[in-house]
């Protein structure tokens, strides 16, 4: 059951995407958005059926306006430090967003209506600490429709399986490579297998794997320019092709994995497939269509989490032309083969992107802590 169950009226372009079977999630959350009712209105007007957050989103939210001043004052009066305050602020926002999406959650039998909150990114290389923090976040938000975001580092793979085995729904984030995506799916199935062995109802456990898109083009295109300067032929036709090809091949992996005998046994026990979530879908190259990573990556059963700018672009002028992922795998492989032939290492690209992605989130987390600390001092 997907977003199509909730797509009835509202914007025709977002409805068209929803009708294909794509679940539209918003990649943004703030206290102002909650207080103003804009988040609730997006459910009706733009067919938004979920929300994702990350440290950068919270850093921006807390650093803008005065929506958090009352809570900061209350936290300061209790003597909370910045770490405690960040935990309470972020879990409060996510809890309230979960309540906003409670109707969607019920209407889709728990498939959508989801709100994601990320573990402290500084723990991404520590499986045990990630597991403990995931449990703590899940308990604090205390809503069935919360998803805990865990980065798909090597250490995170272990944590993903362990957290799912506890019956906690997981959003696996920062997935860049096809090899790592296979490991994520394996960890998901292993987690469900363990949960079932522990006597848990696996029909209550849901997961998505956030496969990052636009950053792949940013990194590959930069390397293609260098290859062109070195006189390597055929580089121009590969510009801005890598991200879509990579995501489409991830869709192939998902399609094959969730028709396997291993999966069918889990499905018989009530398991829901882990859905491919397309993240980082705002275009960073101004020469590209601002809806490129939406219109070219549509298929039944996937999630596309969009920043508000991309969501509004889709609503204004996005042209949805049905399923644009299935049966694109041969050409997608040609694109990645061409990039390799140009001397660009796929492994180095994805390793670089994972490393940089973690660093960006750690920097944002430190910025969030600093902003909150200033707010506590201001209100003490």
Image (cartoon, rainbow, N blue to C red):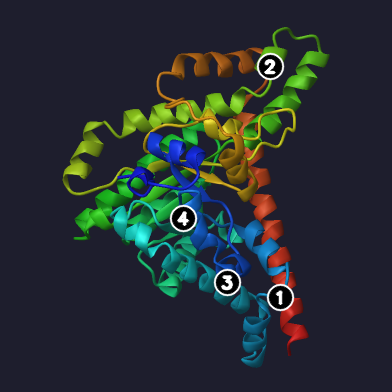
Cα distance in 3D space between marks 2 and 3: 51 Å
Which residue corresponds to the image point at 54% horizontal and 30% vertical from the top-left?
319
Cα distance in 3D space between marks 2 and 4: 45 Å
**Local SS, label 4:** helix
Tell me which numbered mark, 1 or 4, is placed earlier along the sequence. 4
Q: Is 369 drawn above or below residue 21 in the view shown?
A: below
The spot of residue 119 in percent (x, y) is: 53, 61
Residue neighbourhood size for the residue with mark 2, other residues' Cα within 10 Å, grouped as few (<14), some (14–19), many (≥20): few
**Local SS, label 3:** helix
Residue tagged 1: 66
Dot label at residue 35: 3
Residue tagged 2: 343
Residue tagged 4: 43
Q: Residue furthest bottom?
A: 77
Q: Quadrant of the C terminus?
A: bottom right
The spot of residue 173 in percent (x, y) is: 52, 48
Tell me which numbered mark, 3 or 1, is placed earlier along the sequence. 3
Q: Is 286 drawn above or below residue 242 in the view shown?
A: below
Instruction: Tell whether 272 sits left or right of 98.
Output: left
Q: Decide: marks 2, 3 in contact (CB < 8 A)?
A: no
């Amino acid at each position: 059951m997907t977003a199509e169950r909730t797509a009835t009226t509202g914007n025709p372009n977002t409805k068209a995407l929803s009708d294909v079977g794509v679940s539209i999630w918003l990649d943004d959350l703030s206290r102002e958005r909650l207080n103003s009712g804009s988040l609730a209105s997006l459910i009706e007007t733009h067919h938004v059926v979920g929300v994702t957050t990350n440290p950068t989103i919270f850093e921006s939210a807390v650093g803008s306006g005065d929506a958090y001043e009352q809570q900061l004052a209350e936290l300061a009066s209790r003597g909370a430090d910045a770490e405690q305050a960040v935990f309470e602020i972020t879990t409060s926002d996510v809890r309230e967003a979960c309540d906003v999406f409670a109707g969607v959650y019920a209407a889709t039998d728990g498939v959508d209506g989801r709100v994601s909150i990320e573990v402290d990114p500084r723990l991404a290389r520590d499986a045990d600490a990630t597991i403990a923090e995931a449990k703590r976040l899940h308990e604090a938000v205390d809503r069935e429709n919360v998803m805990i975001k865990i980065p798909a580092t090597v250490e995170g793979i272990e944590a993903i399986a362990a957290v799912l085995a506890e019956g906690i729904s997981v959003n696996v984030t920062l997935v860049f490579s096809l090899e790592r995506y296979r490991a994520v799916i394996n960890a998901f199935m292993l987690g469900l297998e363990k949960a079932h062995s522990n006597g848990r109802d696996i029909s209550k456990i849901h997961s998505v794997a956030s496969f990052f898109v636009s950053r792949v083009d940013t990194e590959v295109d930069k390397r293609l320019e260098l290859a062109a300067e070195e006189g390597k032929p055929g580089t121009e036709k590969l510009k801005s092709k890598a991200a879509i090809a990579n995501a489409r091949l991830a869709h192939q992996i998902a399609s094959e994995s969730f028709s396997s005998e291993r999966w069918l046994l889990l499905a018989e026990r009530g398991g829901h497939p882990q859905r491919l979530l397309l993240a980082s879908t705002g275009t960073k190259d101004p020469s590209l269509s601002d809806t490129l990573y939406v219109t070219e990556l549509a298929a039944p059963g996937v999630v596309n989490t969009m920043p508000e700018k991309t969501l509004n672009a889709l609503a204004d002028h996005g042209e949805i032309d049905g399923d644009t992922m299935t049966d694109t795998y041969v050409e997608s492989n040609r694109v990645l083969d061409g990039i390799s032939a140009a001397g660009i290492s796929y492994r180095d690209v994805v390793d670089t992107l994972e490393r940089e992605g973690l660093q960006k989130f750690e920097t944002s987390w430190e910025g969030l802590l600093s902003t909150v600390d200033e707010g506590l001092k201001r209100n003490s």
